[in-house]
Image: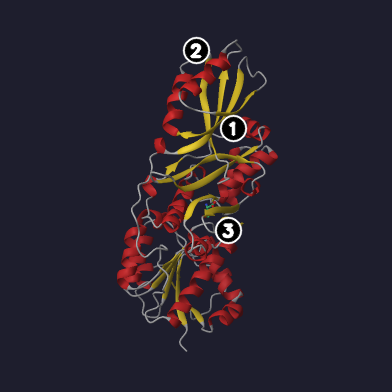
């Protein structure tokens, strides 16, 4: 039987990890596929002698040439970035190659064109490694939960951001110090603002939402807020109220459309999700038949990401063996037909809130603030006055879920009170209980 032949584009953390895993677990993988997987080409500008590549593996920096080679069945794109990854994948598919990619940015922003081309050329794009590293969340949602109507999902889907928040909370370390360590460990994106400003999580959420709800990929409609403004003070107050702050990606089916949002979120400290620390990822999925299910594991790093890449290779090898054209039988975005449900604007979204205001120590301040909230139809869940800080009294208020537009209006009115000083802090809050 002919081997299935691979070209690996990129030998960084993920590419190097995939190569090593294919070598180390070759015997076990062979038992699963009963077909040899042979690496015929490696595309890299920086050769890696440490990877002990067989002499038969052709190494070249001309990636466009590699994706056109006849002795390649599957192209593994693990170089990252939008260009030239997009052009290389298109060219590979045009030449009948299947594609495995870990490139969440590329798929979130250009997936519509890429998946359409894959259908036309009758090849597949497998992308398990693009979301939550080693957690097989794509397969879970697309296949394992296929009988359900998914109501919402909430995930810690950026390891770097979670590592930063965990270290700040547990060890009181500074933001910059922890970010530097995440970069040294190879977790952070080439541009770390992608991690801390939620762009990486928004890329992943775009993919998750599409396969959960059967909607087109719409990265540009994800509301995204980063963690760089989270202070130790708010982490502490949240803790005192029984909450932890996590950077969540949330996709929710609301009455009038779909909410797609990435933002720091207070969640109850006893929730499993609140106890996911360090570089670990976790995704909580609420579905109508099975109820809540939670998936946890390593979301970044060479081994975990390679685990997902190689599992995709195994799937494609099986499809090549057992289906006529190798294109597989599972719709790439989980649904045969996508429905263009409306994506809600930030103002239309509904969440609970943590509000912190700094007020003069004067009679009647609380009454004024609470009456503004009440006039705007906002129900208070908890209120806590903190010890005086620099002549001002920090007041923390937790609210029940409310439309963001209403909260915008209430905060505008509170901010205008002469007794309120500095910018009001608002962090969204989710109880995760339905
Ligand atoms: N920068 C990403 C993270 C890598 O920290 O989660 C995995 O996608």
Circle 2 residue:
418
Q: Which of marks 2 and 3 is nearer the N terminus?
A: 3
Separation (CA) of disc 1 from disc 3? 27 Å
Separation (CA) of disc 2 from disc 3? 50 Å
Q: Which of marks 1 and 3 is nearer the N terminus?
A: 1
Q: Is mark 3 within 8 Å of ligand 1?
A: yes
Q: Is mark 2 within 8 Å of ligand 1?
A: no
**Residue 116 higher or lower than 4, as above or below:** above
Q: Which of the 4 image quarters holds residue 333? A: bottom left
Q: Which residue extends farthest front?
A: 289
**Residue 361 higher or lower than 130, as above or below:** above
Q: Which residue extends farthest bottom?
A: 1
- Which-is-in-front pick, marks 1 and 2? 2
Q: Is residue 191 left or right of residue 302?
A: left
| Residue 241 point in image, percent of width and height | 65, 33
| Residue 294 point in image, percent of width and height | 59, 55
Circle 3 residue:
301
Q: Residue at x 38, y 61 (%)?
A: 85
Q: Which residue is drawn at 42% across and 25% down?
A: 409
Q: Is residue 41 visible?
A: no
- Which-is-in-front pick, marks 2 and 3? 2
Q: Residue 328 carries which label?
A: none
Q: Residue at x 68, y 37 (%)?
A: 172
Q: Could you tell me which secondary element the residue under label 2 belongs to?
A: loop
For disc 2, the neighbor class at 10 Å (few under 14, some 14 to 19, many from 20) is few
For disc 3, the neighbor class at 10 Å (few under 14, some 14 to 19, many from 20) is some
Q: Which of the 4 image quarters holds residue 45? A: bottom left
- Which-is-in-front pick, marks 1 and 3? 1
Q: Which mark is residue 231?
A: 1
Separation (CA) of disc 1 from disc 2? 24 Å
């Amino acid at each position: 039987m002919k081997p299935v032949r691979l070209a690996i584009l990129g030998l960084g953390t993920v590419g190097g990890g995939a190569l090593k895993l294919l070598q180390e677990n070759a015997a076990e993988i062979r038992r699963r596929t009963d077909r040899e997987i042979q690496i015929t080409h490696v595309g890299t500008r920086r050769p890696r002698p440490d990877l002990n590549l067989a002499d038969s593996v052709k190494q070249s920096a001309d990636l466009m040439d590699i994706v056109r080679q006849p002795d390649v069945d599957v192209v593994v794109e693990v170089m990252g970035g939008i260009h030239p990854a997009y052009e290389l994948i298109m060219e590979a598919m045009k030449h009948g190659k299947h594609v495995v990619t870990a490139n969440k940015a590329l798929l979130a922003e250009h997936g519509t064109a890429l998946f359409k081309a894959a259908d036309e050329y009758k090849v597949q794009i497998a992308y398990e490694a693009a979301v939550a590293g080693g957690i097989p969340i794509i397969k879970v949602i697309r296949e394992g939960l296929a009988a359900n109507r998914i109501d919402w999902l909430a995930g810690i889907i950026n390891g770097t951001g979670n590592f930063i928040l965990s270290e700040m909370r547990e060890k009181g370390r500074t933001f910059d110090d922890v970010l530097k360590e995440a970069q040294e460990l190879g977790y952070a994106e080439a541009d770390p603002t992608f991690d801390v400003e939620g762009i990486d999580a928004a890329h992943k959420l775009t993919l998750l939402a599409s396969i959960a709800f059967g909607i087109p990929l719409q990265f540009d409609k994800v509301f995204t807020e980063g963690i760089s403004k989270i202070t130790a003070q708010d982490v502490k107050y949240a803790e005192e109220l029984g909450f932890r702050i996590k950077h969540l990606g949330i996709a929710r089916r609301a009455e009038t459309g779909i909410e797609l949002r990435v933002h720091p979120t207070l969640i109850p400290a006893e929730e499993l999700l609140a106890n996911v620390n360090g570089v670990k990822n976790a995704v909580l999925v609420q579905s109508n038949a099975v109820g809540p299910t939670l998936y946890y594991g390593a979301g970044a790093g060479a081994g975990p990401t390679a685990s997902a890449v190689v599992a995709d290779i195994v799937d494609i090898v099986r499809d090549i063996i057992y289906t006529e054209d190798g294109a597989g039988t599972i719709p790439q975005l989980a649904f045969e037909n996508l429905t263009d449900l409306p994506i809600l604007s930030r103002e239309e979204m509904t969440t609970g809130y943590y509000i912190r205001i700094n007020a003069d120590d004067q009679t009647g301040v609380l009454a004024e603030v609470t009456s503004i909230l009440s006039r705007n139809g906002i129900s208070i869940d908890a209120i806590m006055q903190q010890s005086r800080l620099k002549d001002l009294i920090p007041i923390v208020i937790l609210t029940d879920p409310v439309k963001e537009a209403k909260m915008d209006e209430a905060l505008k009115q509170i901010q205008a009170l002469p007794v309120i000083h500095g910018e009001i802090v608002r962090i969204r809050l989710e109880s995760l209980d339905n």
